Amino acid sequence: MSNLEFYRKRAKQFLRWHQERHWPVAAQIRDALTQYEGRTDREILDGEFKLADAQRLVAKQAGFDSWEVLREQLEQTGVQPKTAVPTRLLQAKPCLWVGDVGRSLVFFEDQLEFVVDFAYGEPPFYAEVEKDGVRFAIRLVDPELVDMAHEARRRDDICNAFVMVELAKPLFQRYVTNGVPFYQKLRTEPWGSRTFVIEDPDGNLIGFGDYGSQAEV
């Protein structure tokens, strides 16, 4: 298979993934194509995505400004670009174990003010939520595992994830107003950072903190 044919097939694969609502492709579309910046995964998958868009996505991932430039380069040289396989890390996505995904989504939406990107199943067994680029995966597991993990976290003060924020105090105050349960209330650490830890309905502990360089508000 020629290099150009490889990219043609890859573009068609991206188009098919979008049509099949393959959720991971949404992040790749958003990261590569400026017209999709700021859209959630659901908005991208619900919107229009043509073969020309898929070709532009492939070109961007290969290090070219457009599909036309990629095609011209390959037709002239037949050389596959060195940047064809990106290795840049894009995002960490902590996975929270829960006994009821629906209950967890209500908590994240109503109290932590996250947006639900999608939920699989009826009732849901897997979902993802997002706020300001921070994402969590939520997975249904056996209640016994949830209880065991909860006991271990409380015994050793282990957070499932830690989120850095611009200023911790205003967010803490907002979460107090929203009735969020706290495992650790707002405090100033010896190194100057202000932190707090919330506890979700399944006992998952999520820490929030700032760098301590901002004036107190």
Image (cartoon, helix red, strand yellow):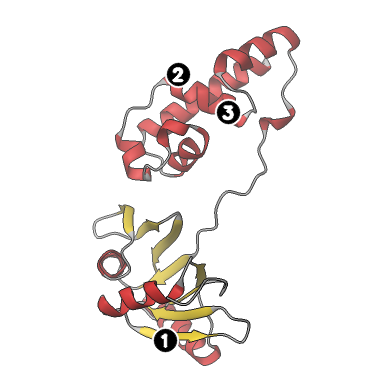
32 is higher (above) or lower (below) than 191: above
For the residues marked 2 and 3, what is the alpha-carbon distance in whole angstroms? 12 Å
| Tag 1: amino acid | Lys
44 is higher (above) or lower (below) than 54: below
Answer whether residue 201 is visible to the viewer in this image: no
- Label 3 sits on residue: 60
The percent coordinates of residue 97 (x first, y second) are 42, 71
| Tag 2: amino acid | Ala
Q: Is residue 69 left or right of residue 181?
A: right
| Tag 3: amino acid | Lys
- Label 2 sits on residue: 52
Check disc 2 and report its element: helix, strand or loop: helix
200 is higher (above) or lower (below) than 79: below
Q: Is residue 186 left or right of residue 181?
A: right
Which of the labelled discs sits on residue 185, or is there none? Answer: 1
The residue that appears at 62% across and 13% down in the rendered structure is: 71
Check disc 3 and report its element: helix, strand or loop: helix
Q: Residue furthest bottom?
A: 155
Q: Residue furthest top?
A: 76
Q: Earlier in the sequence, mark 1 or mark 3?
A: 3
Please tell me in which quadrant of the rendered image residue 122 appears. bottom left
The percent coordinates of residue 120 (x first, y second) are 32, 53
Q: Residues within 10 Å of mark 2 (few under 14, many from 20)?
A: some
User: Which label sits in the foreground, 1 or 2?
Assistant: 1
Q: Which quadrant is the C terminus positioned in?
A: bottom left
Kindly indicate whether the residue at mark 3 contacts the one at mark 2 (C-beta within 8 angstroms).
no
For the residues marked 1 and 3, what is the alpha-carbon distance in whole angstroms? 45 Å
Q: Nearer the viewer, residue 157 or 113?
A: 113
Q: Earlier in the sequence, mark 2 or mark 3?
A: 2
